Structures are given as C-alpha cells and as structure tokens.
Image (spheres, helix red, strand yellow):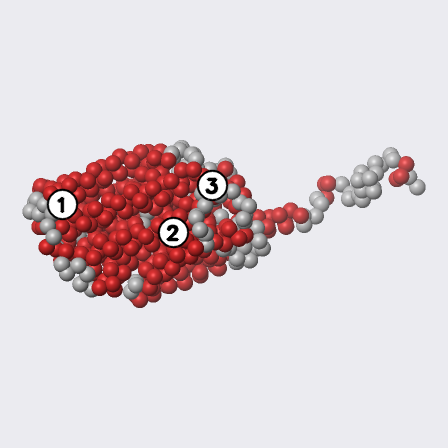
C-alpha cells in the first residue's frame, strides 16, 4: 500500500485476502454459464423494450447505427473490464479496480458514482417494468392500471405501485441467496431470448421498407444523441464483474462472460431494431412506453402478438432488475468492508450467505425512488455514471500495466494502451452529448459524495484504522503486573535473579 493519504493504493494481494475473512465471506457458487446469463440478463431489458422508442425519436431509422455505435463504445471498455475482473477477483467492480490503481479518493468517487448508476438504473428499469405490465394487461385483457398507482407524480400519478412491487420482490430473492438468484435469472434469460426470436420472426414476415426513409432525418447529430441514450440498453455487462467473489473460476469465466454477453446482446439488438422499423414508424414507437409491443399492435396489426411480447418484456425486465440490483449490493458491500461506509453493513447473513441487512436497506430506498421519479430523468443519470466508470476502468488497465507489470493477468487487453485509450475516447464522446442538466445533477451527486468521504470515509477507512491499531499496539507501555522491565543481555536473554551476573 502506497502511503496513507487520500490517494493511498490498496495492494491487490490484500484485497484478495479479505475475501476469505470470517463474517464477510461470500459463497463461490456461480459458474461460467450462469455468469454469462447474468450479463445477458442485465443487458437485454428496458433498453430494447423501452428506450428504443426514445432513441428512434432522435435518430429516426438511423437508430440502427446508434445501436451499433453504442455497442462499439462498450466493446473497448468490456475488454478492460475483462482484464481487471480476471486479475482482481473481488466484489466492487470498477470501485475495487480504482482502489488498486488510482488510489482511495478516486475509488470513493467511482464507488459513489456506481451507487448512483446501479441504484438509479434499478429504479428506471422498475419503471419500465410497470409500463410493460400495463401494456400486457391492456393487450391481453383490455385493462390497464390507473395512472394514480402506475405513474410518478410528474407523469400525472401519485406513485408507481408496480415499480415498488418488483423492487421489493427482487430484494427478497437476493436476500434468499445467490444460488437461487442466478437460477431464476437463467430461466428468465431463456424466456427473454425466446421472446426476441419470436418478435424478429414476426417482424421479418411482415417486413416493409417504407419506414426507412428518410433514413437519418437529424443527420450525424441525431445518431450520436440517440447513441448516448441507447447506451442505457448495453449497461449490464459490467455487472458481471461484481460477481467476482462468487464465481467458481473467476480468472477463466469472467472474461468469457463479460465479452460473450455483450456480443450475444448486440446480435439480438441489431436484428430487433431492424425488424421493428420494418413494421412501425419511429413516431409510433416513440409515443409508447412499450415500443416493441406498439410496433406489433399498431404497425403490423397483430394484437395477439403484442400481448405475447409485452408478457415477455415483463419477464425480461425482471431479470435486469435482479442482476443490476445484485451488482449494486456487491459494490456497496465492498465499500463497507473497506470502511468507507459503515463496516457493520458488510456482515454476511450466516443462514443465506448474503449481505441481507444491506440488501434490504438498499431495496427500500430504490423502491421509494422508483415510485416517485419519471423514467426520462433517470436514464440520463444512469448513462453519465456508467460512462464515467468506463473512463476510469480503462485508465486503471493502463496504470496497472505500468505499476504492476508482473501481476498475473489471466486475460490481457490486446494492443494496450491503444484499445483502452479508444475506450476512453468513446466514453467521453458519448458523455459530451448528454444534456447540461444531467451534468449538473451528476456534479451535485459527486459533491455530496466528497462531503461524506471527508466527514466519514477518510477517518474510518480500513487503511487508516489498521494503521492506528498497529501504532496503538506498538506504543502500549508495559502493565504493572508484567513485572519489572529488564534489559536483555547481548545474547538476547534477560538475567535471572539467581544468575551470577545479578550479584554484586
């Protein structure tokens, strides 16, 4: 560990050794297939089922290019996540990587940022879940929940009851255990991929080219602006890295899961958006909270198919809530274990093997946020937080290559530092397209985080509390009942009372 100031760096071996401490040890129970399913489960959800409508309103049919641009921007960062996840198999994701490379203050900033990113993301996804639940009820039964209990106050409601319900239900599942959670997620991933295949087949059977002109009504600016929003659809592959401590073989399985899940989702996304525009105009999708269901209903006139898709969207988005919320609990857990937040929250429930107290507390706070905040505001906050995390992860790869060149790296980013630098450039480019009010909210969140760090985190950090305890032990004077202090002889032994050397 270099120093004890605000830029103190945690030794990688020290970070790894903490994962086996009694009371805060997580259970290694997740395999490669389940990790990949976590990535797919986190990525495919609100982005494709909800945000595609907002993206198409900005870029028109060229939203296809926006999806590709967002995927490319993610790919470079995914490579960096893969290297660090395989080298530092510890909960915390970008927070832990920053602690090992850029120092405590930077780690706190990124950890505080990730709390915002993941927590607000769960709330946003829960709001999208409620919209798709209403679309399903309307398509299948001709009934929808009233706005008073299905929309945020800003959207004409009182509170969003479906969003609260799904957050609390997932909270209970995560408390129950990681094995049960990943098993449920795997089932939901199979269902969501089947639903997307169903949509793609139906869309291409009814495909037309009329909606593709004009292709890019807002030009390049529209494509990049939409990509900055659609980027939300790819958030999730980084959540795989938060499961490092619960992976059976993190060095081998995490890189495969991170990169593989991104490739699988990009393939399905591109086919889905082409099919959607082939049966519905961007305007039709932009006006709906469930744009793919609207494309089948209004564009293709297939009400029965819209009902199936809406039900599939509900299942798909449920798995996103599960994985993203799981990721947030593990990041928060790592920060608590390091002392930057209250360490008692890092206690693992001995019955379930999960940080139950922490999970319940976060679940309640996120449920309140989901009940009261509209989707549009949430999505932009999530995107800027994620892009900022990507910048620091790419920097972390470059720094760790220089400071710890001999550290084992089961996976290495090719052509470093070129690819990480490209990842940084893409992230900054997409951040520049986000609105100024989003930057102001983000700056306010980071400012609040710095206040908390200097008021609490700095003084309670494990780096400083361990040093203080060691100093206290080394400076403790001998107790009265320890007997008289004697000076050892040169041979290292103290003289005995009957020794000749003690006689006058």
* Residue 474 drawn at (x, y percent): 67, 48
* Residue 487 drawn at (x, y percent): 80, 44
Q: Which residue is mark 3?
A: 410
Say which mark, if any, is on residue 438. none
- Which residue does the image show at 31% across and 50% down from the upper left? 235
- Which residue does the image show at 57% across and 50% down from the upper left? 1
Q: Give left or right: position of 448 versus 216.
A: right
On the question of residue 131 being in view, the answer is no
Q: Nearer the viewer, residue 139 or 383?
A: 383
First in residue order: circle 2 vs circle 1: 2
Q: CA distance from mark 2 to mark 3?
A: 17 Å
- Which residue does the image show at 30% across and 63% down from the upper left? 433
Q: Nearer the viewer, residue 60 or 245?
A: 60
* Residue 365 drawn at (x, y percent): 32, 50
- Which residue does the image show at 51% across and 51% down from the upper left? 401
Q: Is residue 28 depicted above or below 291 in this figure?
A: above
Q: CA distance from mark 3 to mark 1?
A: 42 Å
Q: Is residue 110 depicted above or below 12 in this figure?
A: below
Q: Residue furthest right?
A: 504
Say which mark, if any, is on residue 77. 2
Q: Residue furthest front?
A: 415
Q: Quadrant of the C terminus?
A: top right
Callout 1: helix, strand or loop? helix
Q: Is residue 255 depicted above or below 447 in this figure?
A: above
Mark 2, other Cα within 10 Å: few <14 / some 14–19 / many ≥20: many
Mark 3, other Cα within 10 Å: few <14 / some 14–19 / many ≥20: some
Contact (Cβ within 8 Å) of mark 2 with mark 3:
no
Q: Which residue is mark 1?
A: 203
Q: Give left or right: position of 163 versus 341.
A: left
Callout 3: helix, strand or loop? loop
* Residue 467 drawn at (x, y percent): 59, 50
């Amino acid at each position: 560990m270099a120093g004890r100031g605000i830029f103190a760096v945690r030794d990688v071996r020290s970070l790894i050794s903490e994962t086996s401490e009694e009371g805060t040890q997580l259970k290694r129970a997740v395999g490669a297939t389940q990790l990949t399913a976590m990535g797919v489960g986190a990525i495919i959800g609100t982005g494709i089922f909800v945000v595609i409508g907002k993206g198409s309103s900005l870029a028109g049919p060229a939203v296809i290019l926006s999806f590709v641009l967002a995927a490319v921007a993610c790919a470079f960062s995914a490579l960096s996540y893969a290297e660090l996840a395989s080298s530092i198999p510890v909960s915390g994701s970008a927070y832990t990587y920053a602690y090992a490379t850029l120092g405590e203050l930077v780690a706190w900033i990124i950890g505080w940022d990730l709390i915002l990113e993941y927590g607000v993301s769960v709330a946003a996804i829960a709001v999208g879940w409620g919209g798709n639940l209403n679309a399903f009820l309307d398509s299948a039964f001709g009934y929808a929940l009233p706005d008073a209990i299905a929309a945020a106050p800003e959207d004409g409601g009182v509170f969003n009851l479906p969003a609260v319900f799904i957050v609390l239900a997932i909270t209970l599942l995560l408390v129950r255990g990681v094995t049960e959670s990943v098993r449920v997620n795997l089932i939901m991933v199979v269902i969501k991929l089947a639903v997307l295949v169903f949509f793609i087949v139906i869309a291409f059977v009814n495909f037309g080219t009329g909606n593709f002109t004009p292709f890019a009504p807002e030009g390049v600016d529209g494509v990049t602006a939409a990509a900055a929003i659609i980027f939300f659809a790819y958030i999730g592959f980084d959540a795989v890295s938060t499961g490092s401590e619960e992976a059976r073989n993190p060095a081998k399985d995490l890189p495969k899961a991170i990169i593989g899940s991104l490739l699988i989702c990009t393939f399905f996304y591109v086919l889905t958006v082409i099919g959607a525009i082939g049966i519905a105009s961007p305007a039709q999708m932009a006006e709906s909270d469930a744009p793919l269901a609207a494309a089948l209903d209004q564009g293709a006139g297939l009400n029965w198919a819209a009902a199936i898709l809406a039900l599939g969207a509900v299942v798909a988005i449920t798995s996103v809530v599960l994985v993203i919320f799981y990721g947030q609990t593990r990041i928060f857990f790592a920060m608590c274990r390091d002392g930057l937040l209250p360490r008692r929250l890092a206690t693992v429930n001995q019955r379930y093997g999960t940080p139950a107290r922490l999970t319940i507390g976060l679940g309640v706070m996120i449920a309140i946020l989901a009940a009261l905040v509209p989707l549009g505001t949430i999505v932009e906050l999530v995107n800027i937080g994620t892009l900022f995390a990507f910048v620091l992860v790419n920097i972390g790869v470059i720094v760790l290559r220089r400071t710890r060149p001999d550290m084992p790296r089961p996976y290495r980013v090719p052509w470093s530092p070129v690819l990480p630098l490209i990842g940084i450039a893409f992230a900054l480019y997409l951040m520049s397209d986000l609105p100024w009010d989003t930057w102001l909210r983000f700056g306010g969140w980071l400012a609040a985080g710095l206040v908390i760090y200097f008021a609490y985190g700095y003084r309670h950090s494990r780096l400083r509390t361990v040093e203080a305890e060691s100093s206290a032990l080394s400076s403790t004077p001998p107790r009265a009942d320890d007997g008289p202090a004697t000076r050892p002889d040169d041979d290292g032994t103290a003289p005995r009372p009957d020794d000749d050397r003690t006689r006058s």
